[in-house]
Image (cartoon, grey):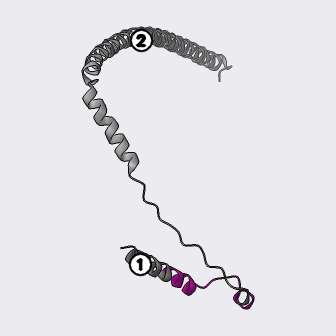
Amino acid sequence: MSNGNGVTARISAAADTVADRASAFSTTVAKNADAAVDKVRKAATGVKQAASGAKKAAKKAVGTTKTRLQKASADARKEAAALQRLRAKKSGAKKTTAKSPAKKSAVTKKATAKKAIPAKTTAKAPARKATAKKAAGTTARKSPATKGVGKKTLVKKNAAKKTSSR
């Protein structure tokens, strides 16, 4: 039988191998993690630069668009002013020819003719009042039949007036 020196040596050799492999593995993991962090930093920097570039491009586009719109607005104002001046010139020329005395008298004749025609008015018949006896005997509410009768008599009265005036 052995005293155990061989077993101890094998166990210590296996422990050294495991330690070396664990160290190598941790080094590899650490390197990979560092590489991943570097990649993320580079990507973040790239995104930041791209965003900055997009911001600058958008700002430039907005600036040029504002400038174009201001120029178009100024041009439109100038054109509108020119059109107003042209219209004023044309209307001034028409006004001088339109002020003939014959046309003016025709306009005043039409106005006086319109004033001479009286407007038609419709006369309302006065509402009938109930006598004291009827008021005492009936309630305050009117029935629909009495309202219809009042309208018929009004029509008859108007018809009688029209025939008598002819």
Q: In which quarter of the image is residue 164?
A: bottom left
Q: Is mark 1 on a helix, strand or loop?
A: helix
**Which residue is under mark 1?**
159
Q: Badge 2 local density, few (<14 within 10 Å), some, or many (20+)? A: few
x and y percentages locating residue 27 in the rendered image: 55, 11
x and y percentages locating residue 162 in the rendered image: 40, 74
Height in image: 6 above or below 136? Answer: above
Height in image: 70 above or below 111? Answer: above
- Of the residues tagged 2 and 1, which is closer to the observer? 1
Between the residue at mark 2 and the residue at mark 1, the CA separation in whole angstroms equals 76 Å
Residue appearing at x 54%, y 11% in the figure:
34
Q: What residue type is labelled 2?
A: Lys
> The magenta stretch spans which residues?
134-151
Q: Is mark 2 on a helix, strand or loop?
A: helix
Residue appearing at x 45%, y 81% in the figure:
156
Total numbered labels placed on residues in the image: 2
**Which residue is under mark 2?**
66
**10 in magenta:** no
Q: What residue type is labelled 1?
A: Ala
Q: Among all residues in the image, which is located at the extreme right?
A: 136
